[in-house]
């Protein structure tokens, strides 16, 4: 370790020891490294009341149509009619500076039921030996951020990061509504891999990357490949973001986002006919639209999934799903805002093995009132209605199914 001349002079006369000086220099180095590190996070809590669904359930347990079930995609049946701690997120991050070879990092730690409820973490194998319950702890993101001075600079994420698709995010406080959309339920949540982002200018940004799998899970692998497929097959992803310039007047700041992710997402086992595992591919298009009316914005999100889950529901299933969501947000006052979301989704599924075909439709309407009464607190009341209709043929008998859900939610989030 190097010491400056002043430190060496003090050591010579016995004023300080080189050991203590070394420790002081190490402490200064740690303090310098931590000085640009930021700690933030939030606590997400709720109260939920859901009216029992009006339904005529089919007389069998093996239900082929999964994506649009479980009440609301935000919480399912596990948090009905009571108070809930949803999740606590602690973020430790050092943002990159403006230098050409900048470096930084970000870690999002999750605590609480949603840490594994939405499977953004790989630590879902931890169980309680007595109850067999999943541990309420997970890692949402943990990546090293790097910049390479190529062109305008390419920003890289290397490690675990959230998906590039979607109008909404895992952090419900950043979404217009408390409950998440059905579109969000169809999208990937987390990848382990590398992602590069290049900003052409203030209006054009594109990203591309590779990851182990389409499905969530830290260090997940494409574990069900057949012998003739490459062990190096990875999940690919790409996106393009366009922002309207100031010259577009009232539309300035509007955004258009296009993206796709394809790869392993929990594939079916090869069946007796010799078919092999298949990938899932997600396509996404979304836009946020500014208007001439102060405080009023609209949004649209379209998701299309080819071969949902690779057909993992049962051997031989192939499912194609699409979902469209329309959003409207109005900032009525400095503290009061109103948010509305309407959705329509459609699933078509079939199985050559079991001669099972069907069609599933879902309608949903969500209204949210948000009021900023306390500093750093998001407080909102929400009402949501879902209608699920299924029509199918198993080859042995036909079935149709109709189910409605009405939920009322109170949500309080503290951000720090």
Image (cartoon, rainbow, N blue to C red):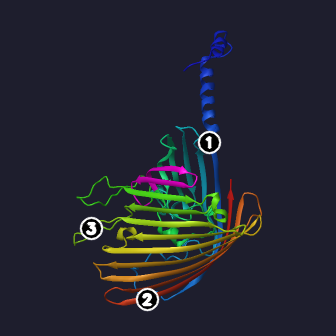
Q: Is residue 228 left or right of residue 68?
A: left
Q: Is residue 250 left or right of residue 345?
A: right
> Which residue shows up at 29% across the image and 60% down it?
225
> Callout 1: helix, strand or loop?
loop
Say if residue 121 shows up in the picture.
yes
Residue 194 on the magenta segment: yes
Give the mark nearer the N terminus: 2 vs 1: 1
Q: Which residue is mark 3?
A: 270
Tell me the tag on residue 37: 1
Q: Which residue is mark 2?
A: 400
Tell me the crowding category of disc 1: few under 14, some 14 to 19, or many 20 or more residues within 10 angstroms, Cα based.
some
Give the distance between the C-alpha atoms of the residues marked 2 and 3, in whole angstroms.
30 Å
Q: Position of residue 194 (x, y in %)?
A: 44, 49
Give the mark nearer the N terminus: 2 vs 3: 3
Q: Position of residue 248 (x, y in %)?
A: 63, 62
Q: Position of residue 59 (x, y in %)?
A: 41, 87
Question: Secondary structure of the magenta portion, mostly?
Answer: strand
Tell me the crowding category of disc 2: few under 14, some 14 to 19, or many 20 or more residues within 10 angstroms, Cα based.
some
> Which residue shows up at 50% across the image and 69% down it?
185
Q: Residue furthest front?
A: 247
Tell me which corner region of the image, top left, top right, bottom left or bottom right, holds residue 319: bottom left
Say if residue 139 shows up in the picture.
no
287, 333: nearer the viewer = 287
> Which residue shows up at 39% across the image and 83% down it?
358
Q: Are marks 2 and 3 in contact (CB under 8 Å)?
A: no
> Callout 2: helix, strand or loop?
strand
Give the distance between the C-alpha atoms of the residues marked 2 and 1, in whole angstroms.
56 Å
Task: Look at the image and tell me in which quarter the N terminus lies.
Answer: top right
Give the distance between the C-alpha atoms of the residues marked 1 and 3, in whole angstroms.
48 Å
259, 235: nearer the viewer = 259
**Residue bounds of the magenta highlight:** 191-215
270, 57: nearer the viewer = 270
């Amino acid at each position: 370790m190097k010491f400056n001349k002043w430190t060496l002079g003090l050591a010579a006369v016995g004023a300080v020891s080189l050991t203590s000086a070394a420790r002081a220099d190490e402490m200064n180095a740690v303090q310098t490294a931590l000085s640009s590190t930021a700690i933030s996070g939030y606590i997400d809590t709720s109260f939920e009341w859901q009216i029992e669904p009006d339904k005529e359930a089919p007389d069998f347990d093996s239900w082929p149509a999964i994506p649009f079930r479980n009440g609301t995609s935000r919480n399912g049946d596990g948090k009905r009619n009571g108070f809930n701690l949803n999740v606590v997120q602690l973020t430790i991050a050092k943002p990159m500076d403006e230098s050409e070879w900048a470096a930084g990092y970000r870690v999002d730690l999750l605590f609480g039921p949603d840490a594994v409820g939405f499977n953004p973490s790989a630590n879902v194998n931890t169980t309680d030996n007595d109850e067999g319950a999943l541990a309420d702890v997970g890692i949402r993101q943990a990546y090293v951020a790097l910049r390479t001075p190529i062109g305008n600079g390419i920003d890289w994420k290397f490690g675990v990061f959230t998906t590039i698709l979607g109008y909404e995010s895992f952090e419900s406080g950043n979404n217009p509504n408390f409950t998440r959309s059905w579109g969000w339920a169809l999208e990937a949540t987390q990848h382990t891999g590398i992602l590069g982002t290049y900003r052409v200018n203030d209006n054009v940004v594109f990203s591309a990357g590779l990851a182990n799998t389409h499905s969530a899970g830290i260090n997940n692998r494409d574990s069900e490949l057949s012998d003739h497929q490459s062990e190096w097959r990875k999940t690919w992803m790409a996106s393009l973001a366009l922002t309207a310039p100031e010259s577009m007047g009232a539309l300035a700041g509007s955004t258009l986002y296009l993206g796709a992710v394809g790869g392993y997402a929990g594939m079916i086992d090869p069946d007796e006919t010799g078919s092999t595992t298949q990938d899932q591919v997600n396509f996404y298009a979304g836009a946020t639209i500014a208007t001439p009316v102060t405080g009023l914005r609209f949004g649209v999100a379209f998701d299309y999934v080819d071969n949902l889950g690779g057909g993992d529901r049962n051997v031989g299933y192939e499912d194609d799903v699409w979902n469209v969501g329309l959003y409207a947000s109005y900032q009525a006052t400095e503290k009061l805002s109103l948010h509305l979301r309407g959705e329509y989704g459609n699933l078509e599924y079939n199985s050559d093995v079991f001669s099972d075909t069907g069609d599933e439709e879902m309608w949903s309407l969500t209204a949210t009132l948000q009021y900023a009464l306390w500093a750093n607190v998001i407080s909102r009341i929400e009402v949501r209605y879902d209608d699920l209709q299924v029509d199918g043929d198993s080859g042995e008998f036909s079935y149709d199914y109709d189910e409605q859900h009405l939920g009322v939610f109170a949500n309080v989030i503290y951000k720090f």
